Each structure stands twice: as structure tokens, then as C-alpha cells.
Amino acid sequence: MPTQFGKHFWPNSSFVYGLRLDYLSPIIYLTDILILVIFIFYFPKLIKVIAKIQKKYLIGFALFLLFLSLGLIGAKNYQAGLYGMIKVLEFSFLGVFIIENFKTLNKTILFILLWITITFGSALALLQYFNQGSIGGLFYYFGERTFNAQTPGIANASINGQLFLRPYATFSHPNVFAGFLIIAMLFLFAFVGKAKVFSLFLWPVIILGTSVLLLTLSRTAILLWVTYLIILFGIWMYEKYKKGNYNPTVFVPAVVGLLAIFIILFQNGFILQRFISTDLNDESIIQRQALMSSSITMFANHPIVGVGVNNFFDNLSPIAGNQRNILIQPVHNIFLLIMSEAGAVGLMFAVYLFSVSLLRSSRQKQKGTLLLAVFAVIFLGMFDHYFLTLQQGQLLLSFVLGIALAKS
């Protein structure tokens, strides 16, 4: 999931108002190749899996694809829409593959891979933060982009008049990195209590991941993770107390470590200023409001099937409200994006999928971590778009919903 290593192509369909958009560029990622390999070897079994799926689900998904296709009729950017349809099919397959096979996955290997990924990404992010730029070299082949604090369009944060580069690791944006850290650390928490070796390795990586999450300065992610830590810690203490295993020495190191992180990072108001300095009149806030207004207008004009997959950008007006040359970005809300591109039909499908995922995950016994992961996608998706528009976000979405719906 962390790598964004891939080959970009730039056909005419990837330009909007003369601007070249990554969102519309057909890209062959390394992860696409891995999914293709899985598809080729799994195809014989996939036919059998599809044959066993209840007809109502097959018909529902077929109708969803049909309405998505109808939305491309008369779309302003048919080529981009066709590429979007391919991505829908790709990640739908990945989701089905996870649903069918997650129960057979060696969970110890999953723990090790997540632990390595968080450690590697966090270490690279720390290097980027102190370097105020990318590290380069071998890290390029892991997916690190080349950038520094002065790179146009790079994610900086202005705190007390000073610009800070928000670390990317190997992700396409600090917000995506923050979302990944939350979900990956939640999955690690599911291993608490299974074996002492898991708990031994868990807390160092949680402290490291939390520290770097704070450095991303992703406000919604930080608020969500602080809330989750309080919830998870409360659940853990309650279970210990209920079983009669209440021993302060077990959790004191974790509490002290986490408190040390917050004290160090908050003592100069560094993180706090990120929240206090938020102004509803900021240009970024105004732009987001303009994008929301545009998405609602698109839905009002195309209420049933929307403007077409991947056609949000081509339906943006270059002038919105008081903004001249509006920033060509997706609306920062996955539900508004679905509503504008896929209409009411797409929105109903998404709401149903998330509802079932919440219901299924609430019945599984991973100390509530899976339920929190699904809610994290919904909550973060209310303030950002990467779960639908960026490869790494799409992978995260497929994994979380696939595991939530898995036969386990």
C-alpha cells in the first residue's frame, strides 16, 4: 500500500483547462501489476466464487455498473470516465478477493508486514521533516517523490509565520499518509492480548507512528487518532479489570511513552497552533466550500447518474463564487464526490456498502478495532477525497471494506 511507484501517461483526456492533472493520468502502478498477477492466478476460482454469490448481490452490482456506464453517455471526458470504470472493476475484484481469502491469511505475517511498513514509513517521514525535503536515492524506488519546502503545490503548514514541510513518506500527500497510519495501527491493536511477543513489539511502533502522525499536521486525522487512543485504552483497561488482571505495571510504560510524545510536541504550541490558526476565511477553506457548491450543482443537474466517473474536474467552472481560476481538485468529501459523479444511484450503493460494513465489523471480535477502521474511512472521507481518487487511498478502502465483509 505505501508505494506510489508507477508510470504516468498524459493523453489529452488528462488535461483540464490546459492543466495537467495527476487524477486523470492513466497510471500503471507497481500495485496494479501485483493485483493483475493475483487476478490471473485467482481467475479459475473467481468464477466459482461469483457462481456462489447470492443473485440479489450480483444483480445489485450489475445495476450499479450499468448506471455508471449510463453516466458516461454524453460525459465531457469519456476517456477519463472509461479509465475510472477500469479502476472501479480493479478494486471491486480486490475487495472480493479479500472477502474470500482473509480468513486464510497468516495473521502473524500480517502483523510483521504492518509493523515493518509503519516503522519504515515513519522513519522516512522523520528524515523528510528534519531535512525539510525528500531524501532521494533508493527511496525513489519505494515511491518517494522529489520535493522540498519550496516545491510548488507542496503541503506546507504556516505556524506563527514559519513554514513547515509536512512529511509525505512514500505517499502522495501527508493526509493520505496520516490515514494509512491510523488504519494500520488500528489493525495492530487487534493483536493485543494474543501473545506477549505482539504486545512487546506493538507499543514502540504505536509511539513512533503516533509521533509521526502528529508531524503530518493532518487536523482531522490527529483529532480522530487522539479520540481512538482514549477509546482503545479505556477498552483495554476495562477488559483487564473484568478478567482480574488489572496490573498497573503492564500499561504504565505505554501511558508514559504517549504522554512524553504529547508533552514534547505540544510544549511549544507547535501542534496546538495548527488548530488555533484555523480560519474559516482561509483560502483553502473557501476553495473547499466552492468545490462543495460545485458538486451540489452537478448533482442537481444530473441527479440520477451524475456527470460520469472521473468527470468532476471537467464540469468545474473556472470561476466559482469570488474565486478566479478555481483550484482544479476533487471535492473534499467522498460522498459528495460519489453523488456528483454517480448520482443518487451511486450514493445509495455507497451508503449501503458502508452500512453493511459497519454492521458486519461490529459483530467481529477484534476489540472493536475493525469497526473503528471502517468509521475512520467514513470520518476521514467526510473531509478528504483520497479514498476514491488516489491509488493508495483506493487500496486502503478496498482493504478495510474487504476485511469488514470477510468471511471469518
Image: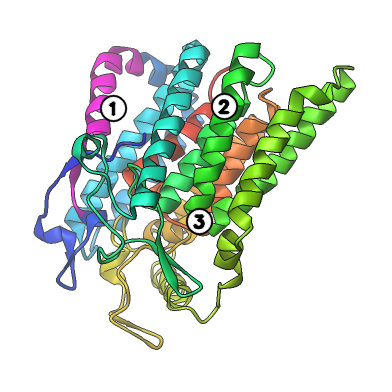
Q: Mark 3 to mark 1: distance in Å?
A: 30 Å
Task: Provide the secondary structure element on which disc 2 rests.
Answer: helix
Q: Is residue 220 above or below residue 184?
A: below
* Residue of label 2: 188
Magenta span: predominant SS is helix
Determine which residue is flagged by label 1.
35
Which is in the foreground here, disc 2 or disc 1? 2
Looking at the picture, tell me which residue is in the foreground, 42 or 217: 217
Give amino acid for label 2: Leu
Vertical placement of residue 99 versus 215, above or below:
above
State whether residue 394 is above or below residue 404. below
Position of residue 49 measured from the top left corner of the image (x, y, whole percent):
41, 17
Q: Quadrant of the C terminus?
A: top right
Q: Residue at x 14, y 71 (%)?
A: 18
Mark 1 residue element: helix
The residue pinned by badge 3 equals: 218
Provide the residue span drawn in magenta.
Answer: 25-47
